[in-house]
Amino acid sequence: DAGVIQSPRHEVTEMGQEVTLRCKPISGHDYLFWYRQTMMRGLELLIYFNNNVPIDDSGMPEDRFSAKMPNASFSTLKIQPSEPRDSAVYFCASSLGLARSTDTQYFGPGTRLTVL
Amino acid sequence: TQLLEQSPQFLSIQEGENLTVYCNSSSVFSSLQWYRQEPGEGPVLLVTVVTGGEVKKLKRLTFQFGDARKDSSLHITAAQPGDTGLYLCAGARDYKLSFGAGTTVTVRA
């Protein structure tokens, strides 16, 4: 298996522009997670899906952030409009189950977003 | 404020030395995981501990879960340059993972 795939790997954009990050989870995994990693706040859970349905979006910072999962093999995280404080590395992860002892979250390589 | 506090934040040691990283919280977790992250990559799971007082060993790495399931430690024996990386602990609570800020470990050859 190719693992979790994220694109793009790097994104540089200007404040006010729309940014779309993409993720392909591991085939057969029922859960998909979006995380954000910064030096100040570490790794934070933004939202997670179960069988394509958003379950908990309490970590989404503002209405400027939205996430969708139209099918089992694709998810997007959109920021509109983007701001410099959104600069971070965004990770997508997937797992068979949810944070039980046998469930492993597999992380993608991340998208490094820079908003100028 | 982080739910999990890791210490130290940075650790630089010589090859062959031992090191310990701590992960502490005032909250109880159903399980605790340790990850290692290398530059430009996502975190990779090293181990999951579930039972209070549990000790797991993976070659030169020893993981311990506190009796009260609020804290954990990672001990590396005879560290090697390949152990260099960011070590993250993550506690499972309400079916979600909360991560510590991480400990950056550098092992000098």
Image (cartoon, coloured by chain):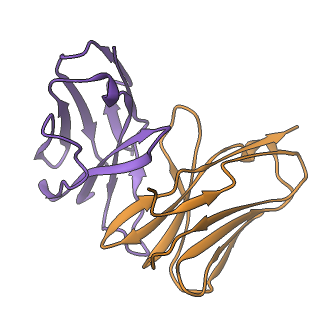
Give the left or right position of residue A26, taking residue B59 as reference.
Answer: left
User: Observer-nearest residue: B87 or A107?
Assistant: B87
Task: Answer with the quarter of the image where residue A58 lies.
Answer: bottom left
**x, y percent for residue B105:** 71, 46
Q: Is residue A27 visible?
A: no
B41 in relation to B10, above or below = above
A64 in relation to B29, above or below = above
User: Observer-nearest residue: B36 or A62?
Assistant: A62
The shade of chain B is orange
The residue at 31%/68% (across/down) is: A98
**x, y percent for residue B16:** 91, 52
Give the left or right position of residue A35, taking residue B46 as reference.
Answer: left
Task: Answer with the quarter of the image where residue B71 lies.
Answer: bottom right
Q: Is residue A38 visible?
A: yes
Q: Quadrant of the N terminus of chain B?
A: bottom left
**x, y percent for residue A95:** 33, 59
User: Observer-nearest residue: B73 or A97?
Assistant: B73
Give the left or right position of residue B105, taking residue B43 as reference.
Answer: right
The residue at 24%/16% (across/down) is: A15
A79 in relation to A60, above or below = above
A52 in relation to B53, above or below = above
Task: Answer with the quarter of the image where residue B6 lies.
Answer: bottom right
The residue at 40%/57% (across/down) is: A105
**x, y percent for residue B89:** 54, 60
The shade of chain A is purple
